Image: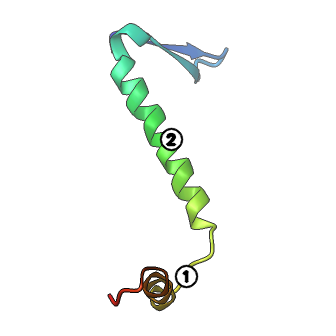
Amino acid sequence: MDGIKYITDEAGRRIAVQIDLEKHKQFIEDYLDFIEDENDVRNVVNEPLIPLEEVISKFEKLHGEKL
């Protein structure tokens, strides 16, 4: 693939990659955004869940409206 070079060890196994940022800038940005989003999801997964009924009740008390 144009703009991508693999670094290999003595046995010929790929151990690293060099990517031409000028040619593949959008891909790199999209990939880094994906990693950031995945991290955000992992952080949220560990938060405790609140039952929907409790959320509705708190909303109604706070805003004085029925949902």
Using the image as rendered, state which of residue 60 and residue 24 is in the foreground. 60
Task: Please name the residue shown 36% across and 86% down the image.
Answer: 65
Residue for badge 1: 50
Q: From the viewer's perspective, is 58 left or right of 30?
A: right
**Residue 35: mark in rendering:** 2
Rendered position, 37 above or below 51: above
Residue 8 point in image, percent of width and height: 59, 16
Q: Kindly state the secondary structure of the residue where label 1 is placed.
A: loop
Mark 2 surroundings within 10 Å by alpha-carbon count, few (fewer than 14), some (14 through 19), many (20 or more): few
Q: Quadrant of residue 30?
A: top left
Residue 62 point in image, percent of width and height: 49, 81
Q: Which is nearer the N-term, disc 2 or disc 1? A: 2
Task: Please name the residue shown 42% across and 80% down the image.
Answer: 63
Q: Quadrant of the N terminus?
A: top left
Marks 2 and 1, Cα distance to the nearest angstrom? 27 Å
Residue 49 point in image, percent of width and height: 57, 78
Q: From the viewer's perspective, is 56 left or right of 50?
A: left
